[in-house]
Amino acid sequence: MKEPVPSTAFADAWIQVDRTENPDFFVKLLDATRAELLERARLSPAAFFAHLDIRPEHRVLDAGCGTGTCCACLQISCPTEARWASISARPW
């Protein structure tokens, strides 16, 4: 097993978040700093993602989606013919 990356190298730790001493710190930080945005996406997905102008022929990839909360909202706002996928390196 590889040695954990110390969380003191904050900027560098984002690159290897799963190897930090406390990966959950980063999850909680993202949840706390993005709570308002996610709430807006949940309340009105179509309005929140309207600027993306997703059309039926589009393919959407959310790389680094984390827990997938934003992806679920995005799926609601996509035309039914559009295809989308999400991927995260960390199994939640």
Image (spheres, rainbow, N blue to C red):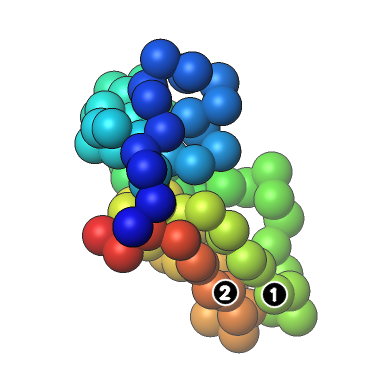
Work out which residue is located at the far top of the displayed protein and give it. 8
Q: Can residue 44 be seen in this view?
A: no
Q: Is residue 66 visible?
A: yes
Q: What residue type is labelled 2?
A: Trp
Q: Which amino acid does label 1 sit on?
A: Arg
81 up-or-down from 5: above or below: below
85 up-or-down from 71: above or below: below
Callout 2: SS? strand
Which comes before the other along the chain, label 2 or label 1? 1
Q: In this view, does 34 lie to the left or right of 85?
A: left
Q: Which residue is drawn at 49% across and 42% down?
A: 16
Callout 1: SS? strand
Query: On the image, numbered disc 2 is attached to which residue?
Result: 84
- Taking depth in this image into account, of 33 and 9 the one nearest to the observer is 9
Q: Residues within 10 Å of mark 1 (few under 14, many from 20)?
A: few
Residue 5 lies, in percent from the top left, at 41, 33
Residue 20 lies, in percent from the top left, at 36, 35
Can you tell which mark lies on residue 42?
none
- Taking depth in this image into account, of 61 and 58 the one nearest to the observer is 61
Q: In which quarter of the image is the N terminus?
A: bottom left
Q: Residue at x 31, y 64 (%)?
A: 91
Query: On the image, numbered disc 1 is attached to which residue?
Result: 59
78 up-or-down from 36: above or below: below
70 up-or-down from 36: above or below: below
Residue 44 sits in quarter: top left
Q: Residue at x 62, y 66 (%)?
A: 61
Work out which residue is located at the far bottom of the displayed protein and give it. 81
Q: Is residue 50 left or right of residue 36?
A: right
Q: Quadrant of the C terminus?
A: bottom left
Q: Give the distance between the C-alpha atoms of the residues marked 2 and 1, in whole angstroms.
A: 6 Å
Q: Do the residues labelled 2 and 1 touch (CB within 8 Å)?
A: yes
Q: Residues within 10 Å of mark 2 (few under 14, many from 20)?
A: some
